Amino acid sequence: MRIVIIGQEEPVYFGPFLRGIIEAVPKEVVLVVIVGSRGAGSHPKTFMEKLKNIYILWLIMEPYGFLRNLFIRLYQKLIMLLGPIGKVFDKRSIQGAACKHNIPIVHTEDVNSKDFILKLKEFAPDIVINQSELLLKEELLAVPKIGFLNRHASLLPHFRGRLASFWSHANEPPEYGVSIHFVDKEIDSGPIIVQRKFDIDPRVSYTKVLDLVFKDAVDIMLEALD
């Protein structure tokens, strides 16, 4: 199977998840695409809007989770600045895993652009695993032979869209799980391939919920690929 991976360099959760897939099936991954940080939806533009978002994250993640994740991000930025020396300590970047296995890397800000679609066609993918927040258009979705796959942190069709695991945690009663589904032109509405429910103590922090939801995410994606 020819697999293409699309994702953002996010070192806390998404990077390790996508690295896990690359490490599990390196010979099947033919291309890694790294996209910019801007995805679907609106984004803060002013300093006050950014400050408000940081405050919301502080409330959602709670102090321990917020500070831990901030430390991981700062540590990752530091080792990336160290060049070849930093690569020795890099266990979280998608690019690092791709380089380790000599997998081609493409950087893009717009996966729906004509240029990128032409580039993607050159690699003739069977499956594209998408873990970016970008909205994918029909012309792009038509490229892979089998389709695009997404890992979503809820038991779809419940809690589609962003912060799915948070809304699952805030729900009464809480329900936790991961869905691997085909991507279509709507948001998290494609056919479900694999779905796994988790038994998590609702009294734990949201940070702990995220840790547990991502813990088995690689295995669940590999099950979907089978």
Image (cartoon, rainbow, N blue to C red):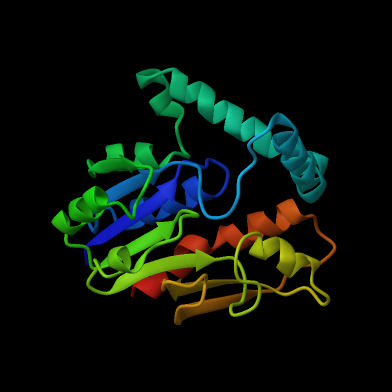
Give whichever of 165, 27 is nearer the camera: 165
Residue at screen point 76% across, 66% down: 169
In the displayed structure, does residue 154 sit left or right of residue 33? right
Task: Count how many numbered circles sit on residues in the image.
Answer: 0
| Quadrant showing the N terminus | bottom left
In the displayed structure, does residue 67 sit left or right of residue 76? right
Q: Position of residue 14 (x, y in %)?
A: 51, 50
| Quadrant showing the C terminus | bottom left
Give whichever of 226, 181 is nearer the camera: 181
Q: Is residue 15 visible?
A: yes
In this rendering, the answer to whether 11 lies above or below 23 is: above
- Residue farthest toward the front in the current orientation of the protein: 46
In the displayed structure, does residue 203 sit left or right of residue 31? right
Q: Position of residue 31 (x, y in %)?
A: 25, 50
In this rendering, the answer to whether 125 lies above or below 57 is: below
Give whichever of 74, 112 is nearer the camera: 112
Q: Which quadrant of the view contains residue 129?
A: bottom left
Q: Is residue 19 visible?
A: no
Q: Which quadrant of the view contains residue 93?
A: top left
Residue at screen point 37% across, 64% down: 137
Q: Which quadrant of the view contains residue 57?
A: top right
Q: Position of residue 120 (x, y in %)?
A: 22, 55
Residue at screen point 42% across, 50% down: 7
Residue at screen point 56% across, 49% down: 13
Q: Position of residue 43 (x, y in %)?
A: 61, 45
In this rendering, the answer to whether 35 lies above or below 75 is: below
In the displayed structure, does residue 171 sit left or right of residue 159? right
